Image: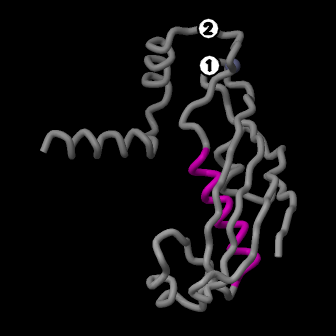
Amino acid sequence: MKIEGIASVAAMPRLVSLLADDTGEIQVSLQFATDEQRLRTATGSARGQVNVTCQRCLEPVAVEVEATVALAVVLNEEQAKNLPRYYDPLIVEAEDVELLSLIEDELILSLPLVAYHEDCSIQTSFGEAEEAARTQDTKPNPFSVLAELKNKADKS
Ligand SMILES: [Zn+2]
């Protein structure tokens, strides 16, 4: 069984929290099947365009997001642990809700860390932009924390 559909970006609050606005649609294409191990699977993709904030002019800029879906339906956490590695578990209790939420996770991972308009009206050199970000934004961001961890790991 194949399902094609459109999911509204506005229905993905965790994704929206990282975007400039909640406009946009995600085209979802999923194939439901039973594989040779008798696992019920959902495979396919979700892709669309969302608006993130341009890090130069702070206006919205459109970027592509894409999620690859390879899920196997399981009844509980125990079954989830025993799945082949190429599947993510889809625990069946909340199939509908969970499915969109898993797609949302993948879309979030596909977001660029920073985005700029290709022809942004505010032209700054990369160094200046970085300097500005450093002085304006003192909140730790998760990516810089990751970078620090990586640096530490490299040194040891
Ligand atoms: Zn811009």
Image quarter hosting the C terminus: top left
Question: Which residue corresponds to the image point at 47% horizontal and 90% vertical from the top-left?
Answer: 78
Whole-number angstrom distance, CA of label 1 to CA of label 2:
7 Å
**Mark 2 residue element:** loop
Residue 30 pos. (x, y %): 76, 66
The relative height of residue 79 versus residue 111 in the rendered view (above or below) is below
* Label 1: how many Cα within 10 Å (few below 14, some 14–19, many 20+): many
Would you say the beta carbon of the disc 2 residue lies within 8 angstroms of ligand 1? no
Q: Are marks 1 and 2 in contact (CB under 8 Å)?
A: yes
The answer to whether the residue bearing label 1 lies less than 8 angstroms from the nearest atom of ligand 1 is yes
Where residue 34 sits, quadrant-wise, is bottom right
User: Which one is in front, 147 or 134?
Assistant: 147
Q: Give the residue at mark 1.
A: 56
The secondary structure making up most of the magenta span is: helix
Amino acid type for the residue under numbered disc 1? Arg
Q: Position of residue 59 (x, y in %)?
A: 73, 25
Q: Nearer the viewer, residue 126 or 48?
A: 48
Q: Which residues are magenta?
A: 94-110
Residue 47 vs 11, above or below: the answer is above
Q: What is the three-letter code of the residue carrying label 2?
A: Gln
- The residue lying at 82 percent from left, 53 percent from top is 27
Q: Mark 1 or 2 closer to N-term?
A: 1
Tell me if residue 150 comes above or below residue 74 in the rendering.
Answer: above
User: In the image, which disc is placed on residue 123?
Assistant: 2
